[in-house]
């Protein structure tokens, strides 16, 4: 566990590295990110176990966090690909701003929702037991401490909450 001095050192290191990183040509930055992704994959289970110990998450949730992190790295590497025309992101406000800035700088349509406000849509033909299990699992799994937690519920074709249960 790190202390305040560790945080200060990390901030100084990040500020120092920023100048060099921002001046690094995009192909070289992409190569570095691909190497980072490779290292994440090689150490996937070990890192997932650390997340479990440090954050109290289940191993499956920790593995999901790892997979999401790797996807963000892949996103950063592939954003300028001409086959990508639009990006949708839900997560922390800090990462949403980064995704938006990076995506729009590459002339992509971007929808970036900060604050991890995920919308759950319940369709009229959803099976009763499954929809209840999915909503409760999303909202309360890991005490709601995950980016995929649903915080907004929209029941399509329903006029009142009591009608949803019937």
Image: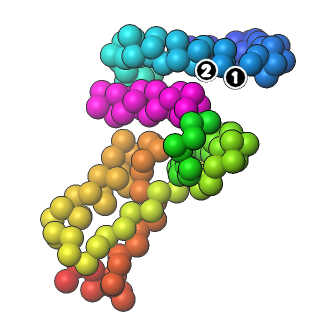
**Magenta-colored stretch includes residue 61:** yes
Q: Main secondary structure of the magenta part?
A: helix
**Magenta-colored stretch includes residue 18:** no
Residue 102 percent location from the top left of the image: 68, 39
CA distance for labels 2 and 1: 6 Å
Disc 2 marks which residue?
30
Residue projecting furthest to the front:
82
Q: Residue at x 20, y 75 (%)?
A: 125
Residue 159 visible somewhere in the drawing: yes
Q: Describe the element under mark 2 as helix, strand or loop.
A: helix
Q: Residue at x 52, y 12 (%)?
A: 35
| CB-based contact (under 8 Å), mark 2 and mark 1 | yes
Q: Could you say which quadrant of the image residue 20 lies in?
A: top right
Q: Residue at x 62, y 54 (%)?
A: 109
Q: Could you say which quadrant of the image residue 97 lies in?
A: top right
Question: Which part of the image, by quadrant, shows the C terminus?
Answer: bottom left
Report the side of 146 relative to 99 (left or right): left
Marker disc for residue 26? 1
Report the side of 70 relative to 17 (left or right): left
Which range is magenta? 58-78
Residue 57 percent location from the top left of the image: 37, 31
Residue 97 visible somewhere in the drawing: no
């Amino acid at each position: 566990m790190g202390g305040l001095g560790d945080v200060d050192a990390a901030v100084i290191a990040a500020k120092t590295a920023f100048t060099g990183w921002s001046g690094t040509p995009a192909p070289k930055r992409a190569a570095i990110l691909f190497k980072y992704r490779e290292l994440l994959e090689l150490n996937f289970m070990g890192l997932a176990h650390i997340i479990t110990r440090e954050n109290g998450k289940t191993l499956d949730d920790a593995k999901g966090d790892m997979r999401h992190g790797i996807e963000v790295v892949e996103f950063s590497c592939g954003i300028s690909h001409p086959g990508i025309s639009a990006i949708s992101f839900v997560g922390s406000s800090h990462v949403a701003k980064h995704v938006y800035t990076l995506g729009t700088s590459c002339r992509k349509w971007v929808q970036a929702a900060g604050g991890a406000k995920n919308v759950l849509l319940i369709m009229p033909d959803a099976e009763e037991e499954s929809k209840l299990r999915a909503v409760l699992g999303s909202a309360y799994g890991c005490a709601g401490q995950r980016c995929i937690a649903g915080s907004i519920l929209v029941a399509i074709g329903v006029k009142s909450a009591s009608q949803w249960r019937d």
